[in-house]
Image (tube, rainbow, N blue to C red):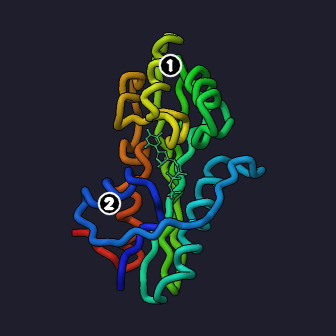
Amino acid sequence: MTIILASASPRRYDLLTQVGCKFIVMPSSVIENNEQAMLPHELAVLQAKEKALDVFSKVQTHDVVIGADTIVVLDGQVYGKPVDKNDARSMLTSLAGKEHQVITGIAVVTANEIWKDFVVTNVRIGDIAAAEIEAYLTTGEPMDKAGAYAIQGMGALFVESINGCYANVVGLPLNKLSELLKKAGVKLL
Ligand SMILES: Cc1cn([C@H]2C[C@H](O)[C@@H](COP(=O)(O)OP(=O)(O)OP(=O)(O)O)O2)c(=O)[nH]c1=O
């Protein structure tokens, strides 16, 4: 049995490595679509499941595949990764001075079953000056991050407070993942 992380995200790789998991990486070829008409948490779970199932179809049946999808939700509106700098600027401008939710859906797929769940973390972003947004955009950091910021990077300068799982914001809720892995018969400790 091999544990496979169905993700191209270096953050997810780092988080899973942090907890001593021995795994390999196989990114999925799923194209995300955050415009689908469903509740934000359902969307995150669906996309996590699609990523995990896509990779599961290419591996051995006794393997265990982990998929995840992180979205930012502000007043019911879903923000994925920005498509360009303008999109990133508009996301950061909207997030400033408000609280939003970061939702990560996760799915653990085995031959017998699909375990799936999601975690919500509340994040409050403080006021951000327009010049700070411009400076942050030039770092390039926002471009591959849901909501156009990275709490684990310079984006931390904007985060006033968080309520909930930190790893969830970075892209992989480790406590919830451990719960699902245990159900799938995988113990990390
Ligand atoms: C909010 C936030 C998101 N992110 C990242 C985590 C995810 O990599 C990314 C959200 O995009 P995802 O679509 O969830 O993942 P991905 O495209 O990077 O990788 P894959 O689909 O192959 O698994 O945003 C941070 O790194 N820090 C943050 O503070």
Question: Residue at 59% across / 66% down in the picture?
Answer: 29
Q: Does residue 182 sit above or below 9 in this rendering?
A: below
Q: Nearer the viewer, mark 1 or mark 2?
A: 1
Q: Classify mark 1: helix, strand or loop.
A: helix
Question: Residue at 61% across / 50% down in the picture?
Answer: 41
Q: Classify mark 2: helix, strand or loop.
A: helix
Where is residue 70 shown, x and y percent of the image?
53, 49
Residue beneath disc 1: 133
Where is residue 169 shown, x and y percent of the image?
43, 42
The label number, if any, that marks residue 88 in the structure image: none
Q: Of residues 59 and 52, which is closer to you in this image? A: 59
The label number, if any, that marks residue 16 in the structure image: 2
Question: Residue at 37% across / 75% down in the picture?
Answer: 3
Q: Does residue 174 sit above or below 91 in this rendering?
A: below
Quick one: label 1 or label 2, which is nearer the N terminus? 2
How many marks on residues?
2
